[in-house]
Image (cartoon, rainbow, N blue to C red):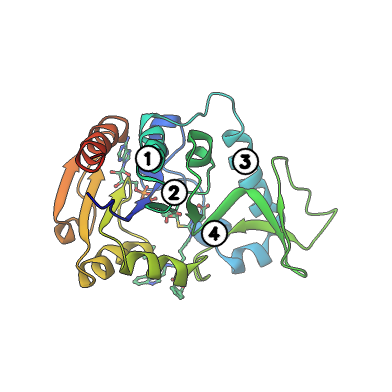
Amino acid sequence: MKKPFIVILTGAGISAESGLSTFRAQNGLWEGHDVNEVATYEGYQRDPIKVHEFYNMLRRKLNDPQVQPNAAHFAVAQLEQQLGQDNVLVVTQNVDNLHEKAGTTQIIHMHGELLKIRNEMTNEVIFCDYDVDYTRNKYLRPHIVWFGEIPLDMSYIYDALARADYFISIGTSGNVYPAAGFVQFARQHNVKTIELNLEPSLGNNLFDQKIYGPASKVVPEFVDTLIEKFKK
Ligand code: BV8
C-alpha cells in the first residue's frame, strides 16, 4: 500500500506531561506575564532586559534534566521512522526541543526555538543554551516569533498541507493563528483531519476524527493503528 504523506501540528499540550507549562492552563505560561510585554516586538523594544529574563527562565527550565520527551513525542518520532522521512512532517508551535530529543528529524518550529538567538543586524541564528546578557550585545534577540510577527517557513508549510493525505493536530487549543487555520486549509485540499487533544479545541468541529485524552496515551495508540494500516 502506498505510504501516506502526513503533516502533524503540535502545541503545548504534547509537552505538558514532560513538565512544560501550556499557555492557557490555570498556571499557564502567560499567567503572571503580560503577553504584550514578553511576546511582542514592541514589548521587547520597551524592556529588552525583562524579555531576556523571561526567555532565560524558560531556557533554564528546558535545560532541567527532569524535562524529557514523553511517550507522545516518541510515538511521533516512531511514525517517521516507520513510514520514512519523506512521509512525515512535524510542524510545531512549541519552542522546546523535545521532538528532536525523541528522534524526529523532519520538523518546522513555526514559532521559533528557545535554544536559538538571532542577531538582528545580520539575521544570523545562533545556538544558545545559556542565559543571554543583553548588556553585552544589544543585537541578540530570542529566535522566537512574537505576536504580530510572521511565523517561519509559512509557504513550505502550506505546500505540505496542500499535498498531505492526513493532517493530525496534537495538544493545541486552536487559539493562535495562522496555526489555528491549518485544519480549514487542509479540509479545502481534501486532507483527512484528526484531532488528538485532552479536550475539544476551538476548531474541533472541523476535524473528521477526534480522540480525547492525555497525549502520552492517545498518541501512541493512534500511531500504532497508522503503522499497522500502512506497514504492508
Ligand atoms: C501573524 C512563541 C501575520 C512565543 C507564540 C486571525 C484572527 C485573530 C487573530 C489573529 C489572526 N491572525 C493573526 C492574529 C493575531 C495573532 C493571534 O492569533 N492572536 C490570537 C491570540 C487571537 N497571531 C499572530 O500574531 C501570529 N502572527 O499572524 O502574523 C501573518 C500570518 C500569516 C502569514 C502572514 C502574516 C504569530 C503568533 C505566534 C506568537 N508566538 N509562541 C513563546 O512561545 O514564548 S504563540 C504560543 O501560543 C504558542 O507557540 C502557541 O502557538 C500558542 C499556545 O497555543 P497552544 O500551543 O495550543 O497551547 P494552549 O495552552 O493554548 O493549549 C494547550 C492545549 O493542549 C489545550 O487544548 C489543552 O486541552 C491541551 N492539553 C493540555 N494538556 C494536555 C493536552 N493535550 C493532550 N495531552 C495533555 N496532557
Whole-percent x and y of residue 161? 33, 65
Residue 14, above or below 150: above
Q: How far apart, in angstroms, are the residues tagged by discs 2 and 4? A: 33 Å
Q: Which of the two residues, 122 or 23, is positioned nearer the viewer here?
A: 122
Q: Is mark 4 within 8 Å of ligand 1?
A: yes
Crowd rating for badge 2 (residues with CA inside 10 Å; few <14, some 14–19, many 20+): some
The residue indicated by pointer 1 is 76
Name the secondary structure under disc 2.
loop
Whole-percent x and y of residue 139? 78, 63
The answer, for residue 149, to whether it is visible in the render is yes
Q: Earlier in the sequence, mark 1 or mark 4?
A: 4
Residue 98, above or below 185: above
Tell us which disc is closer to us: 2 or 4. 2
Residue 96, above or below 139: above
Q: Earlier in the sequence, mark 2 or mark 4?
A: 4
Q: Which of the two residues, 116 or 37, is positioned nearer the viewer here?
A: 116
Q: Is residue 33 left or right of residue 54?
A: left
Q: How far apart, in angstroms, are the residues tagged by discs 1 and 4? A: 28 Å
Q: Identify the mark at residue 59; answer none if there is no mark.
A: 3
**Residue at 44%, 49% in the rendered image:** 85
Res 5 quadrant in image: bottom left
Amino acid type, mark 3: Arg
Q: Ligand 1 shows up in which quadrant of the image?
A: bottom left
Res 19 quadrant in image: top left
The residue indicated by pointer 2 is 85
The residue indicated by pointer 4 is 39
Q: Which of the two residues, 47 or 156, is positioned nearer the viewer here?
A: 156
Q: Identify the mark at residue 88; answer none if there is no mark.
A: none
